[in-house]
Image (cartoon, rainbow, N blue to C red):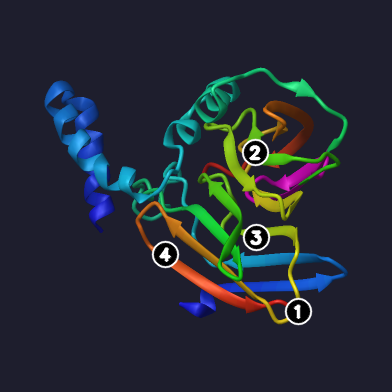
Amino acid sequence: MANKMRVVAKLAGDVTTVKALIKHPMDTGQVKDKKTGELIPAHFIQELTCSHNGNVVMTALWGAAISKDPYLSFRFKGAKAGDKFTLSWVDNKGEKDSSEAVIS
Amino acid sequence: MTDMKRRTLLKGTLAFGALGMAFSAGLLTPRAALAAWPQGAFEAKSVDDALKALFGSTQLEGNDKINIKLPEIAENGAVVPVSVEVAMDGVESISILAEKNPTPLTSSYTLNAATEPFVSTRIKLGKTTSVIAVVKAGGKLHSAGKEVKVTIGGCGG
């Protein structure tokens, strides 16, 4: 599953900038399948947790209005080059994934 | 697969009233066990209802220290880049709402002391709407908004 996520954490001065791309359909549950005419069931990421060396630095709560194949960027302080950054998510079907990056 | 079954059952519950209520109560428990995801806020149909469910208050203070960046015209409503940056200390959370979306709350970010008050993501907009950033800091809700013209909506198929 690791290839479904790309996480980069780059340090500049004291601030680490995180950029993440996740492969996920983010279906709203309001769109009809063009072939069958049936609604495509909602399937979207609900919660993302970002940790630096095991400490949570940011939690994102998402609804289905986040675009397909979501992108997220944010910044935090206090990290050193070589530190571990982890991003994990769970969706409304209970599927989950996580990815690790080394801060550089 | 189970979710599809659950969906159809849920649809049925709407039609069959009381009998269905018992069903849905049982069926919804696994979701509640998942996490503290504020379902009520995300399913709210108006900005006020979403704010009430999320913060218990709808009192917003306009604040020019919130910088919300969005394109003026979004040709494709399915992918609209948005970023929010706040020039304040002690920001606890940032939430992004699209007023005219069927469910306005798009996302909410909880920050801590180490996190800079900045988030950037991409959202779906159903039609031309104002997008509001609500920032919780010092126990108060601050907000700033921006109108986005949407050429092709990103909610339908």
The nearer-to-camera label among 1 and 2 is: 1
Q: Which residues are magenta?
A: B67-83
Q: Secondary structure at mark 3?
A: strand
Query: In the rendered structure, which amino acid carries the disc numbered 4?
Result: Lys
Helix, strand or loop at mark 2? strand
For disc 4, the marked residue is A96
Amino acid type, label 1: Ala
**Which residue is at the front of the view, B142 or B12?**
B142
Q: Position of residue B143 (x, y in %)?
A: 75, 28
Q: Residue at image x 45%, y 77%? A: A1
Residue A97 marker:
none
- Categorize mark 3 by other alpha carbons within 10 Å: few (<14), some (14-19), many (20+): many
Disc 3 marks a residue whose amino acid type is Tyr
Chain of the residue on which disc 3 is drawn: A
In this rendering, the label closer to the viewer, 4 or 3 = 4
Which quadrant is home to the N terminus of chain B? bottom left
Residue A102 located within the stretch drawn in magenta = no
The residue under label 1 is: A81
Real-space Cα distance between discs 2 and 3? 16 Å
Q: Is residue A23 above or below residue B128?
A: below
**Outermost top residue:** B59
Q: Amino acid at mark 2?
A: Ser
- Please indicate whether residue A34 sits to the left or right of residue B64 in the image: left
- Of mark 4 and mark 3, the one earlier in the sequence is 3
